[in-house]
Image (cartoon, rainbow, N blue to C red):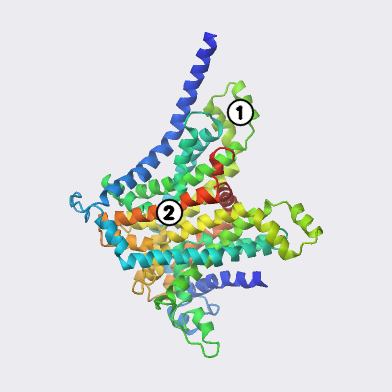
Amino acid sequence: MVLITLSLIIIVPIMILFFGSLKTTGEMYLHPYTLPNPPHWENYGRILSLQSPFWILLRNSLIVMLATTAIVLAICSLAAFVFARMRFRGKDIAFNFLTLGLMFPITVAIMPVYLVIRDIHLTDSLLAVILVQVTFAVSGSILILHGFFRAIPVELEDAAYIDGCTSFDFFWRILLPLASPALAAVAALTMIISWNDLLTPLVLLNSDTLWTLPLGTMQFQGQYSSDVAMVSAFVAISAIPAVIFYLFAERQIVSGLTAGAIKG
Amino acid sequence: MKPDNHIRSARKVQVNLTVILFLLPAFSLFLLFIVFPIVRSAYFSLFDWNGLGPAVDFVGLDNYKRILADQVFRKAVLNGFLIVLLSLTIQLPFALGLAIMVGRDLPGRTFFRTIFFLPYVLSEVITAIIWMGLLSPDPERGLINALLVLLPGVQAQTFLSDIHMVMASIFVVLTWKYFGLYTLLFTAGLQNIPKEIEDAARIDGANGWQVIRYITVPLLTGTILTCVYLSVLGSLTQFNLVWIMTRGGPVNASEVMATYMYRYGFIRFWLGYGSAVALVMLAICLAFSIIYLRFARQPDYLGNM
């Protein structure tokens, strides 16, 4: 019973949003909570029309998300490999240093980061957003990958070295393929966080041609707040990619989150 | 034994080179975009600086004195602690109860997990806009008021524009968005507890509540502490939902540290003052982290994970 009530509390608000997005604003005031009858797809048509800003927002969000994820995977798997499989002096200190980022979220550091980005003349560029998102994903991702990399048996490594592999060969040909579920988990988690990030683009980007979806959605809501149906449609459309992605990658997201949390 | 030493030191050079090369990118980003900015802002926080031209107007610790004396900042800190308190006493126990209820083998478990976790995946912007609709003061537009006015003698509430209800409303939205995350983490923690231990307690005559109280919850301590940590840090630095739904209003009633920092640092563009606010936030987060690591948990990822 409790579970079903709770599910309704989650689902009903989202349904109201989708129903609303298929009505005209007038209908929304008359019958706010009913099924759209008949459904008005015009809102969607207007938002998805070619000259609509939606496509630019979508493109920017995709660029930022894909670049951030790719860089996080590359940088963090290299670092996690070193921490998990090699012995060297100062390892604990280096590891603690790189996981220091877990102690405070990006919100705390956004003002200092902004000042640096401004002074290297990188504001108002997607590159700045990507670099900042990558930096704040480093700690958590290294931690998750480190745990997975350590779990790979040391015998495999010995065998590889006896067969003449270099460290990089072992890393590239043996470790990464074996750790692909971990990489998928880190990738899925990074994608979600990057996709939903509002503060970094809000602070770093001025031009509306560079805005990402959350930032654009927020501005759209502010600009068209009287046209409730349009705002609903805009929000609904911008939610769709995340929901679809979630339904496909739920297992990866979940395993990334739980691995990070349990090991952190 | 000279050749052997030679080989060993060649191998050592190779290892060290790999270590340096592989760590270089992560370290560079970390130094450039976390350590260096924070150190630099610590310096700027000693200036009265509006961002035009260089920072020259040295004011010592005046910015900090003003922050700590500002009623609005105090309100922001109190609101942050209020969210922390409510999260720890309501949100986490609720999520824990739910995780125990969903349990290991309830039919449809994965279905419920998918539903409960859905709000976590939606962005805060989407969550905020959905809830601004639901909490609308007009019963024709806001579902919550539409339901409230059905009750006898209850009138429509203004929620987000009522200084007494705004924090409670924000907390409801935060709970809607985040309880699924904690339920998920607790469920994962529960799966690590061997079923046999609970069975053994039951055979020894423990009732359902006793099993939960004396077996399940103590064995979940690690997961609980992790959730406490995430929840406290998240609550103290909450920005998005508050900013979109209320901008910290009405009359600063829902101000939190991050919205205060954003208002002074990025809207009024008092960069020296904003830097000082950021450092105060950082100090609060680090203080909490240190207390947590010191008392709640040894950092077990140091070497024996």
Q: On what subunit does the disc labeled 2 rest?
A: B
Mark 1 touching mark 2, by CB under 8 A?
no
Q: Which residue is mark 1?
A: A157
Residue at mark 1 shares a chain with residue at mark 2:
no
Q: Which mark is residue B285?
A: 2
Q: Residues within 10 Å of mark 2 (few under 14, many from 20)?
A: many
Q: Which residue is at a point 37% across and 62% down the rendered structure image?
A: B257
- Kind of residue at badge 2: Cys
Give the x, y percent position of residue A201. 37, 55
Residue at 36% x, 43% y is B35
Residue found farthest to the front? B295
- The x, y position of residue B7, in whole percent, is 52, 15
Q: Position of residue A126 (x, y in %)?
A: 36, 50
* Image mark for residue B103: none
Q: Front-most of B134 and B181? A: B181
User: Taking the image as drawn, is residue A40 in sight?
Assistant: no
